[in-house]
Each structure stands twice: as C-alpha cells, then as structure tokens.
Amino acid sequence: MTHDLLGRHRAVLPDWLALYYEEPLEITRGEGRHVWDAAGNKYLDFFGGILTTMTAHALPEVGKAVAEQAGRLLHSSTLYLNRPMVDLAERIAQVSGIPDARVFFTTSGTEANDTALLLATTYRRGNTVLAMRNSYHGRSFGTVGLTGNRGWSPTSLSPLQTLYVHGGVRTRGPYAHLDDREFIAACVEDLTDLLGHTRPPAALIAEPVQGVGGFTSPPDGLYAAFREVLHERGVLWIADEVQTGWGRTGDHFWGWQAHGRSGPPDIVTFAKGIGNGMSIGGVIARAEIMNCLDANSISTFGGTQVTMAAGLANLTYLLEHDLQGNARRVGGLLIERLRAAAAHAPHVREVRGRGLMIGIELTRPGTDEPDPAAASTVLEEARARGLLIGKGGGHGTTALRIAPPLTLTVAEAEQGAAILERALMSL
C-alpha cells in the first residue's frame, strides 16, 4: 500500500518535494509523543512534524476546541469581526514582550516572514535587509531570496537587497576560535563595518536558534549587541521565532529573550507550534510599525475561526502546564544523556542546543568534514528502532535535529536517547 502511495505521490507532486527515508513513511495516527504508520508500526516522535506538533499528538483540549468551533463556523474571513481571532491576539500580545503590540495572523511561517519584511521595508522606505549566514526563513520568493542556506535557496533572484552577517554559527567560521566575549565583539565589529559600506538597511532578520541550519546559535547576548548598533541607525530587528517560540528552548519563552538586554525586537514572527498541527502563523509588532501600510489588506485564511480556537486552546494548555519548564528540565536531561553517548561516537563533532531543541553535528571521524551519508544512516537506523528524528545543516555541515513535543516525559527522553545512542554506534 505504501509503495502504491509513493508511486502516486511521484506522479502528481514536484520532484523537489523532499521525503525522508529510503522507504518513505505514511503516518496515519498519533497520540501524545507517539505516532503509527500505515503498517501499524509505533514510533516515538522526536521531530513533531518539523516542530509543529509542539504540545502533543491528539491533545484532547485542542481536538475539543476544533470540534466545537467547526460545529458552529469554520471560517468567515477578516472582513468580519472574529471573536476567536481577537481572543488569541490578546493572549499573544500579552506574552509577546513588545509594548503596544499588534498581531496579524497568517497561515504559515513563510507568510509571516514575508509580512514582516513588507512592514519593515515599508516603514523604513528601503529594500536592503540584513540576514544571518546559514539562515532559513521560508519558501516564498521573498524569503528564499534572503535565506542564507544554499541547500534551501533555489534562486538568487529577489525583491530584496540582502547582506549577510556573521554570528549565527558559533563553532565554525572565521571567529570560531574566539571565546564568547571576543566572538560577540568580532561579529559586532563586522556588522559595524558592513553598515559603513551600504545605505542604511530596513531590518536585520534572525532566528535566535537557526532551525534548518542544524540548531546552531550564537552566544547569548549577540543580538542585544547587534541591536545597540542597529538602533543608532534606526534599523529594525525582526526575530524569526517560527521554531524557537512558545518555550521550546526551556530557558526562555521566546528565543530572543536570550538577547534581550537591549530590549525586545521591533517585530516577532511565529508559526508552527502555536497551532499544534493547525495552520497558524503570524506577526507581532509595535503599533506604529504594524500600522504603517497605506493600502487595504486582508488575510483570507489567516485568523480563520477553527485554527484560532486550536491556537488558543494550545497556548492555554502550554501555559497552565508550564511546558516551558518541562522543556528546560527534560531537555536538560536529554542533552546531557546525548552528550554522554556522543563521547563514544567518533562521528559526532558536537551536541548542542537548549531545552527540547537539540542538534547533533556529524563529521567524518578524525576530520571536520560533513558526513551526510552518516546522517542518513542514523535517520534510518533510528526509524528501524522506533524513533523519528530530523536532519539539517548548512554550508559544510551535517546535523541531526531533535525536537520532541514539549510534554515529553523523562522515561521517553531516556528511551529516545538510548535508541539514538545505538543508532550512532551503528556507524
């Protein structure tokens, strides 16, 4: 049956639509931190639909909210007053950390980042944008054009003039040998020099932890130091929280808060986890920035009632059950367990991350060269043992990505770590 579905998939869908595994997997059911495939095999899910099933599969509170709202009204559009949309916007504005916040809903992180770029370039009246090397911000024409990861950027054409900044990858590049304080100083010096060679940009867009790039991040405080330089020139800071938001990093509710010394970002984008599988994205910005557009606009499916009901139920559950705290506690145990296992695995260059957002970088033993074949082997071996994980990386890197739902238990963390240890040792 799966082979037949794969044939049909290849006959009608694009060749560039990526599929994991030599024998691709059809997931038919989920519950908690587990999923089942069409053959009835059970897996512990350590990737959550690319960080989208943030809370749990088939969370009863979300399912009930969706069913009740669907029984009343699925959709009416933003041309009419929408109580679920206002309810969720109020909660997000409250937890955003942005003063006088306004919230605009979209259907994806890509669309959210496109909207943020529209706001920033309109507000600043210029189309030059700063982005981080190794970054990923979506698959639209605008966001692909500024993505700093060649593997996910199929064209150099763009409506934006993009300049790339050092700092998103701590352990590679020209400043990797420096300590954290020196690393930040060198990156700030590079940014300052770059700004002297161009017209003032509209904004810097940055992921606090680079997702597709392999869960890499700078030392805490880098973007705070950047913000001081940018603020002097009126340049906006856009924090792409599509993967890092809602407490996943454990230490903070938003990834930007590790860099909050100089105040919050001007714009925050979000998506993925807030809907726990429903299609929700959005932008949070100060009112003066959000309201800078001088033409009418709507969001046909952004803010639709059934997804807003899901998002509100999911956010309420996350806050009431302190899932950020669980990510910090269980994630801390998991990362230490993986580091202990990696000490005996010669292919592992680094285990990094925080909370339940963990990357394992793989190289050819005895070298600093990436090993994509090893990543594929571990991915397959983990699946064979009942564990689903992700992979990623950027220029010259290969990484495994681990991001379970935030309700992960200690026992499940131990189980997953044991499977990963055996998969790594199989190399």
Image: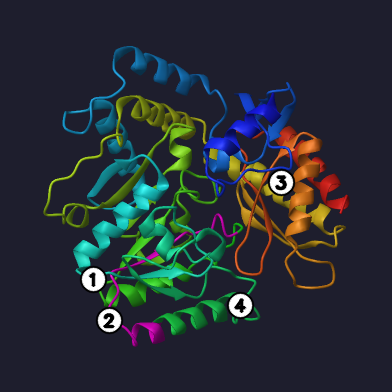
In this view, the mark in front (1 or 4): 1
Q: Residues within 10 Å of mark 4 (few under 14, many from 20)?
A: few
Task: Give me the C-alpha separation between circle 3 and circle 4.
Answer: 28 Å
Q: Main secondary structure of the magenta part?
A: loop
Q: Residue at x 50, y 63 (%)?
A: 135
Q: Residue at x 20, y 62 (%)?
A: 122
* Badge 2 vs badge 1, beta-carbon distance below 8 Å: yes
As helix, strand or loop, the secondary structure at mark 4 comes to loop
Q: Quadrant of the C terminus?
A: bottom right
Task: Give me the C-alpha separation between circle 2 and circle 3.
Answer: 45 Å
Q: Nearer the viewer, residue 349 or 92?
A: 349
Q: Is residue 33 visible?
A: no
Which quadrant would residue 2 be assigned to in this image? top right
Q: Is residue 205 magenta?
A: yes
Q: Amino acid at mark 4?
A: Gly
Q: Is residue 27 above or below residue 336?
A: above
As helix, strand or loop, the secondary structure at mark 3 comes to helix
Q: Amino acid at mark 2?
A: Arg
Over which residues does the magenta segment extend? 192-213
Residue denoted by label 3 = 334
Q: Is residue 172 above or below residue 371?
A: below
Mark found first going from the N terminus, 2 or 1: 1
Q: Where is residue 100 shown, x and y percent of the image? A: 22, 50
Residue denoted by label 2 = 199
Q: Is residue 336 magenta?
A: no
Q: Residues within 10 Å of mark 3 (few under 14, many from 20)?
A: many
Mark found first going from the N terminus, 2 or 3: 2
Residue denoted by label 1 = 126
Task: Give me the C-alpha separation between circle 2 and circle 1.
Answer: 9 Å
